[in-house]
Amino acid sequence: MAAEAAQAMTSGGADRRPRHVAIIMDGNGRWATERGWPRLVGHRRGAERVKQIVRACPELGVDWLTVYAFSTENWKRSTEEVLGLMKIFRRYIEREAEGMSAEGVRLRFIGGRDRLDPKLRALMSSIETRTSGNTRLNLTVAINYGGRDELTRAAGRLAQKIARGEVSDPGENDLADCLDTAGHPDPDLVIRTSGETRTSNFLPWQAAYAEYEFTPTMWPDFTPEHLGTILDRYGMRERRFGGV
Ligand code: IPE
Ligand code: IPE
Ligand code: MG
C-alpha cells in the first residue's frame, strides 16, 4: 500500500468520513411499548426515520448505507408483527420509488428472497432495476438477512462454480463474489441503536474490520444530527487493519 494511502487510513481528523455506514436499526418495539402503543407503531415510525437518514447521507459524505430491516431470526415474532413489517416494506418501496429515483438513490436488497411474499419480491426486483443507474447514494436494505444464511448460500454458489470448473483453488475474493453483497465495499462503520451491544448475525464477513458504535437512542428517535455526531467521532478513530 502506498505510504500516502496508509496515512489517510490511519490518521484521525473529523474530515475523514466513512464511505460505507451500516446500521442495525433496533428499538422500535420498546420505543412504542414505553408509550403504551402497539409495536407496529414503532416500526412505522422507524420507517419514517429511514427516509430522513437516507436523505441526510449524501450531505454527510456517506456514499453507501446498508440498513438491517428484518433478520432470518425475526420470523419468530408474532404473525401480526411479521405481516405488519412486510406491509411496511411494501409500502416503503411503493411510496419511495419516485423520490429515490429523483434523488439519485440506488436501492438494492440483501438476504434470502425465497421465503418472502411473491408480490414483495416482484416489487424489490422492479425497484432495483428502476434505480440501477443512480449513483448519489447506494442504499442496501437487508430483509430476511442473516450472516450465517448468506455465508451458507455463498458456499453453495462457490461449490457450483468449482464443480463447473470456473474456480480452482478458491480464495477470499472467490467467496466474497458469491455473497449477496458481491461488488459492494465493506462497511467502515456499523452503528447499532437501542443500547444492545451485539451484532445479531449482521454482516459477519463484511464487517470483519469495521468500527462499531453503540448508541442508547432508540431507532425511532435517531436523527441525522445523531448520525452526524457519530460520523465526527469516527473521524477521530485510528484504523490499523492489523498494522502498527
Ligand atoms: C428493530 O426493532 C426492528 C426489527 C427487528 C424488525 P425491534 O422490533 O427489535 O425493537 P425492540 O428491540 O423490540 O425494541
Ligand atoms: C436485529 O435486531 C435485527 C434488526 C434490526 C432487523 P433484533 O432485535 O432482532 O436482535 P436481537 O434479537 O435483539 O438480537
Ligand atoms: Mg430488537
Image (cartoon, helix red, strand yellow):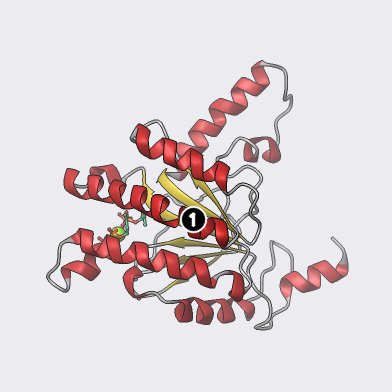
Question: Residue 148 in the image: x percent, y percent?
Answer: 45, 40
Q: Quick one: which residue is furthest to the left in this view?
A: 36
Q: Is residue 197 left or right of residue 242?
A: left
Question: What amino acid does circle 1 point to?
Answer: Glu
Camera-nearest residue between 148 and 179: 179
Question: Residue 90 in the image: x percent, y percent?
Answer: 35, 47
Q: Quadrant of the C terminus?
A: bottom right
Q: Is residue 45 above or below residue 70?
A: below
Picture quadrant of ligand 2: bottom left
Q: Is residue 149 left or right of residue 20?
A: left
Q: Residues within 10 Å of mark 1 (few under 14, many from 20)?
A: few
Q: Is residue 93 left or right of residue 106?
A: left
What secondary structure is marked by label 1? helix
Q: Is residue 92 above or below residue 196?
A: above
In percent of the image, x 63 and y 42: which residue is there?
Answer: 182
Q: Is residue 163 left or right of residue 49?
A: right
Question: Residue 202 in the image: x percent, y percent?
Answer: 45, 52
The quadrant in which residue 130 appears is top right
Q: Is residue 178 above or below residue 205?
A: above
- Check disc 1 and report the residue beneath it: 98
In percent of the image, x 18 and y 43: which residue is there?
Answer: 79
Question: Residue 123 in the image: x percent, y percent?
Answer: 43, 41
Q: Mark yes or no: residue 66 visible.
A: no
In percent of the image, x 68 and y 76: which residue is there?
Answer: 16
In percent of the image, x 40 and y 30: which residue is there?
Answer: 114
Q: Mark yes or no: residue 149 visible.
A: yes
